[in-house]
Amino acid sequence: MPKGNNRGTILIGSAEAEVKSSLVDFVGAAFDKQVLGVTETSDLLLEAIDNELELAIIDTNLKGLPIAKTIQILKKSKPQVPVIVISDDYTVATGSRIMELGIFYYMYKPVDLKNFKEIIESAFKKRAREVAKEGR
C-alpha cells in the first residue's frame, strides 16, 4: 500500500478478500482517486492518518478493534471524512447503533454497485459542502 500525503484517497476495509478486492476494483475504475484496501482496523486507522482521506468504506467484519470503536476513532481524527459502512448484519439494533456514530450511510451486503456508486457520489458532495463551510 502506498504511503504519504496523497490527495484524493478512498480507503476500503474488509476482512473478506473477495469483497475488498471487488470494491477496490469497482471504486478505482469508477472514480479518479487513489483507492487503498485493508483487512484490519489498525491498518485502516494508520492509512487514514497517512493519507489525504476523502472517503472511508468499512465492512463490519474488519479484523481488530470492534467496528464501533474503529468508527469513533476515525471520526475523531478525521471528522470531515464521510464513512460508509457495509454489513451482513440485518438487525435493526446493529444498524441503529452504527448510524448513531455519525456515519454517512449504512448498507447491507451484497452491495448493489449501481446504488453504491450513487452513494459514493453523494458522500463526495456532502464532504465538499462541509469543506466549503469550513473555508468561510
Image: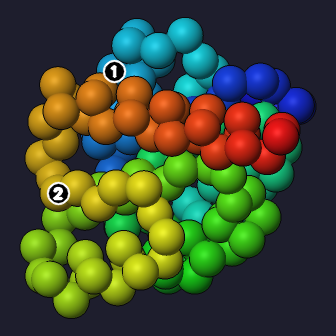
Vertical comparison of 68 with 19: above or below: below
Query: Which residue in the rendered view is the most extreme toward the front?
Result: 136
Mark 2 and mark 1: Cα distance apart in space: 17 Å
Would you identify the image quadrant in which residue 118 lies?
top left
The disc, 2 or 1, on the residue closer to the chain's N-terminal end is 1
Vertical comparison of 28 with 2: above or below: above
Circle 2 — which element? strand
Circle 1 — which element? helix
The residue carrying mark 1 is 26
Residue 92 falls left or right of residue 3: left
Q: Nearer the viewer, residue 84 or 26?
A: 84
Q: In this rendering, does residue 94 appear at all?
A: yes
Residue at 46% x, 63% y is 103
Name the quarter where the N terminus is drawn. Answer: top right
The number of discs equals: 2
Residue at 73% x, 71% y is 76
Q: Nearer the viewer, residue 119 or 34?
A: 119
Residue 121 falls left or right of residue 41: left
Residue 91 point in image, percent of width and height: 12, 82
Going by the numbered disc 2, the residue's amino acid type is Tyr
Would you identify the image quadrant in which residue 122 lies?
top left
Residue at 49% x, 77% y is 101
Residue at 39% x, 28% y is 121
Name the quarter where the C terminus is drawn. Answer: top right
Badge 2 density bin: few <14, some 14–19, many ≥20, Cα 10 Å? some
Q: Nearer the viewer, residue 71 or 136?
A: 136
Residue 22 point in image, percent of width and height: 31, 29
Q: In this rendering, does residue 21 appear at all?
A: no
Going by the numbered disc 1, the residue's amino acid type is Phe
The residue carrying mark 2 is 108
Residue 114 point in image, percent of width and height: 17, 25
